[in-house]
Image: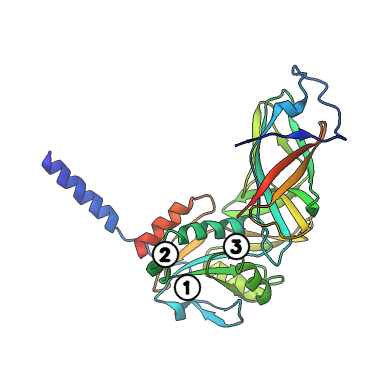
């Protein structure tokens, strides 16, 4: 019985220590501008764990829900853990999401989000590197047009490598679990 | 929480066919109705709820209105190969003896040109418009 218990403990310890996979074939460095007009280069912020989400501020559903869920996770972290993480919201609506608009929108969340923007060409290149997608689609709606887009939140480690992601249909606990394995 | 719904004064006649002769307002239950707070500088928001149809006819929602927004639309979200595609739809169906869940990332109600910001804790009234049945007023609260 004692041997079985020791084996169980060893297996448990092994699972807890198992390293997250490094996704070398996707992701990578990029340069954009934040909501205050300052340059943001991913690699210049290495040392921090980054959460990266591609969205747009007119998005009334997926984006605020994702940010609200990130906020839920954020509130479960200690102040010391929070200091090790940056939250990045990269706009895939370059036409409408100005710096001012990003600043106002993201300022409404109780969360320190860095809003990032670039040209359409820059965003297409970056989303392709991150195996993501966006496309402007005309809509018979007061919205005029919407942006079809991927909904993953990428978890990027202190070296700028993708270590995992959560999709829209996963609960906030999945993101928290990923973060806890990097913190 | 179960929310009672009330028929408005200018409503259409109750259902005319089917085994149930009860006014359809008695056949419809609405649970977990809530709206999302609006985020500046945008003047838009969304609302969600679960509609339970205990009647013998499908209930077809063809519109929604509220005094708190100039424009109200029915929307759905398509999930295709990891892509999220929001689309406006003409109708949403609450199946007979079934339910329709309006929720983020799925079918939902959208509002534009709000009268003012929808703040957490605000109480709102929406009116659901049905193809063949009386309109229904739903009371709900704004959440985060």
Q: Position of residue B139 (x, y in %)?
A: 71, 42
| Residue A133 disc label | 3
Which is more N-terminal, label 3 or label 1?
Answer: 1
Q: Are marks 2 and 1 on the same chain?
A: yes
Cα distance, mark 1 to mark 3?
16 Å
Which is more N-terminal, label 1 or label 2?
Answer: 2
Left or right? Give the position of A75 relative to A183. right
Residue at disc 1, secondary structure: loop
Q: Which residue is mark 1?
A: A28
Q: Which one is in front, B78 or A26?
A: B78
Packing grade of label 1 (10 A; few <14, some 14-19, many >=20) is some
The colour mode here is rainbow
Q: Which one is in front, A20 or B58?
A: B58
In this view, which residue lies farthest toward the bottom? A38
Q: Is residue A79 visible?
A: yes
Host chain of mark 3: A
Q: Quadrant of the C terminus of chain B?
A: bottom right
Which is more N-terminal, label 3 or label 2?
Answer: 2
Q: Residue at x 65, y 49 (%)?
A: B78
Left or right? Give the position of B8 relative to A27. right
| Residue A23 disc label | 2
Q: Position of residue A125 (x, y in %)?
A: 58, 72
Cα distance, mark 2 to mark 3?
18 Å
Cα distance, mark 2 to mark 1?
10 Å
């Amino acid at each position: 019985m004692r041997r079985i218990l020791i084996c169980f403990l060893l297996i448990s310890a092994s699972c807890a220590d198992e390293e997250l996979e490094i996704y070398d074939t996707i992701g990578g460095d990029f340069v954009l501008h934040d909501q205050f007009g300052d340059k943001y280069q991913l690699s210049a912020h290495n040392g921090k764990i980054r959460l990266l989400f591609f969205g747009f501020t007119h998005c009334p559903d997926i984006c605020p829900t994702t940010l609200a869920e990130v906020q839920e996770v954020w509130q479960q972290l200690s102040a010391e853990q929070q200091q090790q993480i940056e939250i990045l919201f990269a706009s895939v609506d370059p036409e409408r999401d100005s710096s001012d608009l990003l600043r106002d929108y993201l300022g409404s969340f109780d969360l320190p989000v860095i809003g990032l923007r670039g040209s359409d060409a820059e965003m297409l290149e970056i989303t392709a590197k991150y195996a993501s997608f966006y496309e402007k689609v005309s809509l018979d709606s007061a919205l005029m047009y919407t942006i079809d887009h991927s909904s993953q939140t990428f978890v990027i480690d202190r070296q700028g490598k993708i270590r995992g992601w959560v999709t829209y249909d996963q609960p906030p606990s999945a993101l928290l679990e990923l973060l806890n394995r990097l913190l | 929480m179960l929310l009672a719904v009330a028929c408005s004064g200018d409503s259409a006649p109750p259902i005319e066919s089917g085994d149930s002769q009860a006014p359809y307002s008695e056949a419809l239950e609405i649970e977990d109705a809530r709206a999302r707070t609006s985020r500046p500088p945008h003047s838009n928001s969304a609302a969600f709820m679960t509609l339970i149809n205990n009647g013998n006819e499908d209930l077809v929602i063809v519109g929604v209105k509220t005094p708190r927004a100039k424009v109200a639309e029915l929307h759905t979200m398509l999930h295709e190969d990891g892509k999220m595609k929001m689309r406006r739809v003409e109708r949403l169906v609450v199946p007979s003896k079934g339910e329709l869940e309006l929720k983020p990332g799925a079918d939902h109600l959208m509002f534009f040109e709000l009268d003012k910001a929808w703040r957490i804790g605000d109480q709102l009234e929406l009116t659901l418009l049905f193809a063949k049945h009386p309109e229904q007023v739903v009371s709900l609260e704004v959440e985060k």
